[in-house]
Amino acid sequence: MNRLTVAALFTWFAACGPAPEDDEVLTDADAVSAELSSATIQRALHWFQANNGGTSFRKVNGASVPSEGRCELAVETSYGKLGKYATAHQNYLAHRAEAASNKSRGLVPPLGASVFYNTSADGHVAFSAGGGRIWSTSVNRRIGNASMWHFQNYLGWAWVGYGN
């Protein structure tokens, strides 16, 4: 390594802060509490369960929209938000580093995480049901539950923080 690389590494490590102590274990629950409350995640899960099999859904503002091709809108609506991202691809770009890191470490998306796919120019996002399952707007052209491998070109998952 050259001196510039070593200096950059020291700067990066200093910016990251101290490493956790041996008795300080960080868990997925810590990530959940930082981004979304358990109650918020449960409400979002209930929204998908209540809309299971539907070909349309009501947005936060009450307007009805077809579910096919409205994945980002559906996930936002499940969390009681509207207009955070125009497309799933924009959402993914905002969380790309976290999603790629979780994918490379082989972590299964926990309940409530946003799961990203490269399925089109607009991308695709699904709501993680945990245990390798997702809720999506495009399961046989309906809102439904499927394996996280139902869609091609899995990009990873991230805590998006729709609840904030």
Image (cartoon, rainbow, N blue to C red):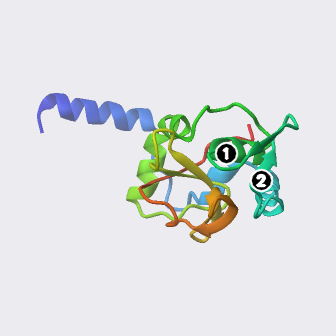
Give the labeled residue for mark 2: 44
Say if 124 sits above or below 142 in the image.
Answer: above
* Closer to the camera in the image, 17 or 46: 46
Could you tell me which secondary element the residue under label 1 belongs to? Answer: helix
Front-lying residue, 121 or 20: 121
The amino acid beneath tag 2 is: Ala
Q: Left or right: where does residue 40 sit relative to residue 105? A: right
Q: Quadrant of the C terminus?
A: top right
Instruction: Indicate the amino acid at tag 1.
Output: Ala
Q: Residue at point 12% right, 39% down?
A: 1
Judge left or right: residue 22 versus residue 143.
Answer: left
- Residue named by callout 1: 34
Q: Is residue 124 left or right of residue 67?
A: left
Give the structural element (helix, strand or loop) at label 2: helix
* CA distance separating discs 2 and 1: 17 Å
Mark 2 residue crowding within 10 angstroms, few (<14) / some (14–19) / many (20+): many
The answer to which of 31 and 132 lies nearer the viewer is 132
User: Quick check: marks 2 and 1 in contact, CB under 8 Å?
Assistant: no
Q: Position of residue 142 (x, y in %)?
A: 69, 59
